[in-house]
Image (cartoon, coloured by chain):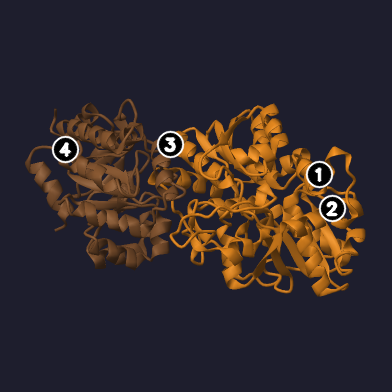
Amino acid sequence: MTTTESGSYDAALHGPDSTGHFGQFGGRFVPEALTAALDELDAAFRAAIVDPAFITELDRLQRTYVGRPSPLTDATRFSAYCGGARVLLKREDLNHTGSHKINNVLGQALLTVRMGKTRMLAETGAGQHGVATATVAALFGLECTVYMGEEDTVRQSLNVARMKLLGAEVVPVTAGSRTLKDAINEAMRDWVTNVEHTHYLLGTVTGPAPFPEMVRTFHHVIGAEAREQVQELTGVLPTAIAACVGGGSNAMGIFGAFLDDREVSLHGYEAGGDGVETGRHAARFSGGAPGVLHGARTYVLQDEWGQTRPSHSISAGLDYPGVGPEHAWLHETGRATYEPVNDDAAMEAFGLLCRTEGIIPAIESAHALAGAMRLGRELGPDAVILVNLSGRGDKDVETASRWFGLLDGERMPEGRL
Amino acid sequence: MSTLHEAFAAARADGRALLIGYLPAGFPSRGDDVAVIEAMVENGVDAIEVGLPYSDPLMDGPTIQDAVQRALDAGTHTDDVLRTVEAVARTGAPTLVMSYWNPIERYGVDRFATDLSAAGGIGVITPDLTPEEAGPWTVATDAAGIDRVFLVAPSSTDARIATVAAASSGFVYAASTMGVTGARTSVGDAARSLVERTKARTVLPVAVGVGVSTGAQAAEVALYADGVIVGSAFVRAVLDAATPTDAMTAVGVLAAELARGVRGG
């Protein structure tokens, strides 16, 4: 195996500091009742990641239950639409439950058991994190409640059924905008009430410390595997990495192993929705401002009074007005760049991957694919672009069918491609 | 000495607890919030917390969420909250703001403290701001001469209580139970123990909030706490009233019952 040693370790790129801050971002903005639980979680996390028994058990589950390592696929036919750049797909869609989400869920579920708690809570947007949590709750024999915005339960009804089949209680949230943001509010309220026996299994790199660091750590395996796989296949490091960014867990997972490789450019793609100029989007970096949401300082879609503005995206998993604080920091330091991808560009990439590679991606991941198309045209045929294909698109078949006009027996119109 | 300090001292001299009432600004409407609060003050509420409506009130239960959403839907902004504070302060009751952190940060930390003070406000309760994140806020509130009130909870360790109390001024807010705001059938035993642990670590008064809704509960809490905070019960009384006039009547009746409660009745 050809591997290149990682460049010199740059402490400035490896937050957070001892108080949970990534520069000015992160921290803890929570009701005091949660401080003790966050301290307990922090201690459990730090003890676990240096405990060989924990590491061995997590590794065993990753291999025998999730199916890791996930493969790297050379997307040769799709590459033709990316300026001829070589596009490599990190296949997190092939994990058990269909996305990267299970990496973090297994880690936190093991912590739940270590802390002696018997119930897990989760929020979910697209349903991927909810399904992963319900799955692992069944595996470990834990109680599970999943909060999901009412609007999302409608557009992701298949995942609601999956969670119920797995034995979880699914609570549709009717407050506020009825999407992921409100599901997180409800999960926090449940947690603060039942914290003694309940762990809140937050599904992305947002929230109060230690969640952003902890969730990133459990997803680090994505980038660590990919870094070796890309070098084994091509003999070099990738030129660029593309990942979609809702809260940003799959992106932190794949970026993390390349932070010190300064020659590798890191690209996060947010949901541009109908276009940033329309106000109907989830582009926190181009359409938001620094603020505090859900326990951390980060970039937030907000109005002039600091009220959270509703986000919009065809992808439920990217439809969130905040973003992980570490992404805010990588944005501020310039180590990673973030750009919006509109619904139509994401769906064009979605359709292309289906037809060129025989892979139906999650619409979330299709934003990263659209980003790779854009990058490839910029970088040219010598570039190697690593895309984190964070999830599969089974859950999105109905949305995609509607988008492409396939319902009522219509054929996919060529114009869409 | 803050006005809050004087209010607590006066209540203590009376041998009773201070009664603090909460209502979100802009609720039940942008015109009627002050009238409802005046009914509270006329019927024995000693101090007022004006809520700053926020889109993501994660410490609040369904009753206050509902009220806050109505206030936001009616277009209540931070400047409206300051106008409400100004009107309420004219009643002579010490007036605080209860606000989640992001609207204060967005308005400008120094500007908020200065404008609140200019409006006659004397303090701010920040339910999601921890002392660790409160550096600029401490400077701004000291400069403006207003009190900053942080919360302790039943899960707080003794060391944590000492940290929170040291960062607070005016009083320390003791959240009676683990959970969100809203009326409960009983105020848990956890509240008494929390107040005792807090009083052992600060000279500041300690007021109990979350879950107190009746005169009997107020009387029970007044036995061990310096102040009793009632929010959701007032909001519920307004939500259940058919007209603004009915709301003022209902709020007045509840205020009188709670005022008897904090006097041991």
Q: Colour of chain A?
A: orange
Q: Position of residue B16 (x, y in %)?
A: 12, 37
For the colour brown, the matching chain is B
Q: Give the residue at mark 4.
A: B43
Q: Earlier in the sequence, mark 1 or mark 2?
A: 2
Q: Are marks 1 and 2 in contact (CB under 8 Å)?
A: no
Horizontal side, residue B45 vs residue A321: left or right: left
In the rendered image, residues at marks 1 and 3 fall on the same chain: no
Which secondary structure, mark 2?
helix
Mark 1: amino acid: Ser
* Mark seen at residue A351: 2
- The crowd level at tag 1 (other Cα within 10 Å; few <14, some 14-19, many 20+) is some
Question: Label 2: few (<14), some or many (≥20) within 10 Å?
Answer: many
Chain ID of residue with mark 2 = A
Return the x and y of residue B100 as percentages of the image width and height.
39, 52
Left/right of residue A409 with respect to residue A289 in the rendered view: right
Residue B62 tag number: 3
Q: Which mark is residue A401?
A: 1
Q: Residue, x 69% and y 29% (percent of image)?
A: A166
Mark nearer the viewer, 1 or 2: 1
Number of numbered discs present? 4
Chain letter of the residue beneath label 1 in the structure image? A
Distance CA(mark 4)–CA(mark 2): 67 Å
Q: Quadrant of residue B104?
A: bottom left
